[in-house]
């Protein structure tokens, strides 16, 4: 099963990268294969493209001793752990196109315990309700195909996880997040594959709608400032980043999630009533982007 | 004693800010007085000046319940804690002028236990050995005036504390750092005052020597990249940042330490033999910048 999942995630990486290259229109991914005693991975990075200022799409498979803090958090004894996953963060150059993150991971302990974790979340710099709704709708459809209780639960999980306590803000407008999904391995793996295969349709239509929107120095400056919040979340709170830095030792691959250019300003609150203020208001009180009554559907978003 | 120390740190803040304004030559500090149920502070920020892209010099005095993690780390029961301190981070615009950080803090627990913590450290983007030696010499003189064993100990403490494990690098070329200085309160306070009063002479001569050095896009780009490491340290490792975000609730004041503009690049290792590589080599194996045999001196650096 480990090999099946790892191999499928590499295939997913191929598919996603190929589509993103077409979407970018200018640059190709550079690939770095790495390996060290605990495992190996494929890091793919596209920089200074026609659409993406930086895009990172990584897979890895490592087997290592569970870090002490993580073992404590999981309420298990320290032991060997296998983890394989795909993780991507796309930072478009245009402030009108949202940044997006997704990751899907399978973890198995020496004692036989296993679970899946993952999710996808959108971080726009300007709020477009239609885009937020479409992103959520895609993920709701994916969840509903497997368990009608999942979308509301994973949507809430996403708002709670991607929260910057010191700012009182979520990182973006959410999506889905599941930290610890246990049950029938085949059924769960089927769901996670469905998630991976749905990523492009959750994001590409938004890119197509926003990529030609005009912007000026004001929007770019706001994007760089908000990217600072992205960095704050990833370094202060993100457990995947902490796990990566503590276990796999390839800092360059883990920190590919950080935006290429970032600004911090002192007390840069947006003007009341501005489009920037509209975004911040949405991040301060997470809302339902779609009608959450279950929809029975077998078609993607 | 609490009031004496707080008041003296505010006076020190006045002195340091007045001198930095003269040094900057263009801008003045903006002051924000803040207070909330746990305490109050004076945040002073100078932005886009003639010398400093951002300079933050803060004082605060708070009384709060010790955060659980910190209590565990200190091996004490959870209880009320009083903390007052001064903290400064200066980010010059020129990549030829080092960034500097200093902070001095007094902490007192409800059970009567108390200690001082603090230090000063220099983060150049290009290594100038004379500057590193002069910075260390100032702090060695300060330490030697109080206890001949302190400089070697605090110098080592600084290299150990300001270390980015995931990068295998120190944040800068060090200085002094003491986390937990206990003993006679009057004598220690005398030392900490001496430290505070010595900050300007440890840094200003370096600024005067470097501020007119020429630089181009290459040096600026390197500075922005290295500032990324500064951010990584502050958000991933710095206990003062964590303490600030967990206890005093004024994120804007705590995060004033972050540089104004920052870049992350994938695998941006410097060319072997370049001036950039010389800096990185110094950060990968901390060295003695001065002869550490004690010097008996009553004159400042």
Image: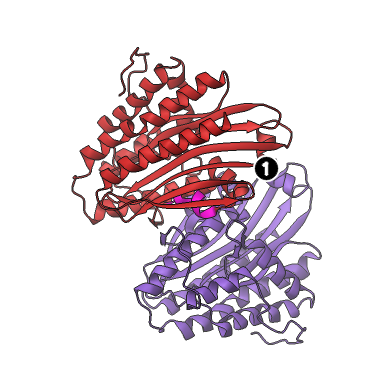
Chain colours: A purple, B red
Q: Is residue B175 magenta?
A: no
The vertical placement of B126 against A4, above or below, is above
Q: Which residues are magenta?
A: B251-258
Q: Position of residue B118 (x, y in %)?
A: 49, 32
Q: Quadrant of the N terminus of chain A?
A: bottom right
Would residue A122 be found to the left or right of residue A161 on screen?
Answer: left
Quarter of the picture containing the C terminus of chain A is bottom right
Residue B19 showing in the rendered view: yes
State which quadrant residue A233 falls in.
Answer: bottom right
Q: Which residue is mark 1?
A: B67
User: In the drawing, does residue A78 fall left or right of residue B259?
Assistant: right
Q: Quadrant of residue A216?
A: bottom left
Label 1 neighbour load within 10 Å: few <14, some 14-19, many 20+ = some
Name the residue rendered at 54%, 54% in the picture: B251
Q: Residue at x 73, y 48 (%)?
A: A73
Q: Is residue B179 above or below residue B151?
A: below
Residue B253 lies in the magenta stretch: yes
């Amino acid at each position: 099963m480990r090999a099946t999942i790892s191999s499928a995630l590499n295939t997913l990486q191929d598919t996603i990268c190929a589509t993103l290259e077409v979407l970018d229109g200018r640059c190709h991914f550079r690939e770095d294969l790495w390996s060290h005693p605990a495992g190996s991975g494929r890091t793919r990075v596209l920089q200074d493209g026609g659409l993406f200022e930086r895009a990172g799409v990584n897979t890895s498979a490592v087997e290592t001793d569970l870090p002490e803090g993580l073992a404590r958090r999981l309420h298990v004894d320290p032991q060997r752990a296998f983890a394989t996953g795909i993780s991507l963060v796309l930072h478009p150059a245009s402030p009108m196109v949202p940044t997006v993150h997704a990751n899907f991971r399978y973890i198995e302990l020496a004692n036989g315990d296993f679970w899946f974790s993952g999710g996808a979340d959108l971080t726009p710099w300007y709020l477009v309700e239609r885009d937020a709704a479409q992103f959520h709708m895609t993920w709701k459809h994916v969840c509903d195909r497997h368990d009608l209780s999942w979308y509301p639960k994973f949507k809430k999980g996403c708002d709670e996880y991607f929260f910057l306590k010191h700012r009182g803000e979520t990182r973006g407008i959410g999506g889905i997040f599941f930290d610890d999904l246990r049950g029938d391995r085949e059924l769960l793996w089927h769901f996670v594959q469905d998630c991976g295969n749905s990523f492009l349709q959750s994001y590409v239509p938004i890119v197509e709608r926003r990529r030609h929107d005009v912007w000026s120095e004001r929007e770019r400056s706001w994007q760089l400032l908000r990217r600072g919040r992205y960095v704050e979340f990833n370094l202060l709170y993100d457990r995947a980043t902490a796990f990566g830095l503590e276990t796999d030792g390839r800092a360059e691959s883990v920190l590919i999630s950080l935006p290429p250019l970032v600004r911090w300003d002192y007390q840069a609150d947006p003007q009341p009533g501005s489009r920037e203020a509209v975004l911040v208001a949405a991040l301060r009180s997470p809302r339902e982007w779609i009608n959450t009554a279950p929809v029975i559907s077998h078609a993607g978003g």
